[in-house]
Image (spheres, helix red, strand yellow):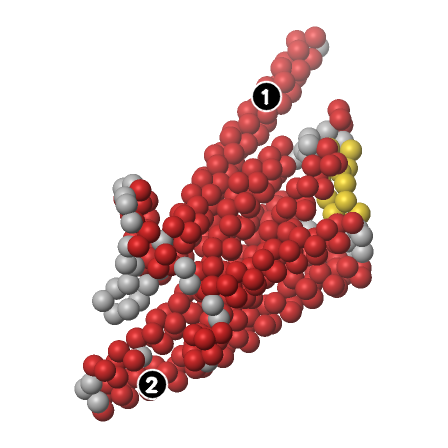
Amino acid sequence: ITDGKVWNGNTSGSTSLEKKNQITTISVFVYLFSACFVILTVSGNLIVIISISHFKQLHTPSNVLVLSLAVADFFIGIFSFPFLAIKTIENCWNFGDIFCFVYNLIGLSLTSVSISNLVFIAVDRYFAVCDPLLYSTKITVYVASVFTAISWLFSLLYTLIILNLNEIGTLGGDEGCRNDCFVIFSANFVIIDLLVTFIMPYSLMISLYLNIFIVARRHARAIRSMEQNQNCMVGIKKNISTKSERKAAKTLGIVMAVFVFCWVPYYICYLIDSFLNISAPAVVKNVLVWLAYFNSSLNPVIYAFFYPWFQKSLKLIVTCEIFAPASSLINFRSPYGFI
């Protein structure tokens, strides 16, 4: 009997040790995965920030908005990702109530900045493609900078109001561990937040890009007709800038589509949890939050595939040619006028 008890005890201890080792292995893997996320997000967006800030030919209204989006994504990578990883892996919030407030303030503000920047980018592309005469005279770098400042100030103010009028804090756990850092929204604020950060901006962006698509198709048909009926390079050159604007609109439309793909599942879960009182498992919520934040890593990848200037500036940065005299004046235009 004694031997049996000892054997059973050893089995239990062995099983417990195996589980602990398994958890440790998973934690190490997730930490490494998170580190790759952080490196990709920070380095990719840093290249965008350096490129647009340094090279004068990239100082365009559209790129000012792209720069603002990259700054928001950069800070998500440098601040939100690491603490989200720790919270997810350790299933424990050890940073106290004050930092819980700061963590939510920064994370929610940066998310709002990203959404508002995407709205302004959609507006910018709409006027560039649909009303190029107005765009060239009214939409300047200064105007884009003003809209960028408005998006940051509004996002910070909105987040401060949301956090101060709702419950925020931590849940106590065993041995002084804070199990979670949470924000509990009242029913009224859930509706307001959904309208402000989801329904209104997404509806506006979809409407604008649909109009851009319709006008772009009309322009494409007109250009094909002109090229078939008039073998005239002058006419083609006049349409180069319009074609370039459509190309930029397509790229930024992809950025918006990826943003929707990454964030809509989170908002759907948010809706179900708030109005149907059906709470998703913690694992599902964590996956959706990671998917939402993964958007910050994807934007530079999109630029790398669709923006020739990103590819060229990356080469200049990696080879340190960016430090050469007058490097800020480098020409990024292709023979066809595209940047």
Camera-nearest label, 2 or 1: 2
Q: In the image, 165: left or right of 84?
A: right
Residue bearing mark 2: 221
When asked about the image quadrant of residue 15, the answer is top right
Q: Which residue is found at the position 57% from the left and 63% from the top?
A: 147
Residue bearing mark 1: 17
Q: In the image, 13: left or right of 279?
A: left
Structural crowding at the residue carrying mark 1, measured as other residues with C-alpha within 10 Å and reported as few (<14), some (14–19) or many (≥20): few
In the image, 143 versus 39, the foreground residue is 143
Question: What SS does tag 1 mark?
Answer: helix
Q: In the image, 51: left or right of 142?
A: left
Image vertical order of residue 118 relative to residue 219, above or below: above
For the residue marked with disc 2, what is the amino acid? Arg
Tell which residue pokes out farthest to the top in this image: 2
How many numbered circles are shown?
Answer: 2
Tell which residue pokes out farthest to the left in this image: 231
Question: What SS does tag 2 mark?
Answer: helix
Asked if residue 199 shows in the view, the reply is: yes
Task: Give the Cα distance between marks 2 and 1.
Answer: 69 Å
Q: Which residue is found at the position 36% from the left and 76% from the top?
A: 242
In the image, 185 versus 23, the foreground residue is 185
Tell which residue pokes out farthest to the bottom in this image: 229
Q: Is tag 2's residue or tag 1's residue first in the polypeptide sequence?
A: 1
Residue 301 in percent (x, y) is at 40, 53
Image vertical order of residue 161 relative to residue 214, above or below: above
Residue 328 in percent (x, y) is at 33, 51
In the image, 206 versus 64, the foreground residue is 64
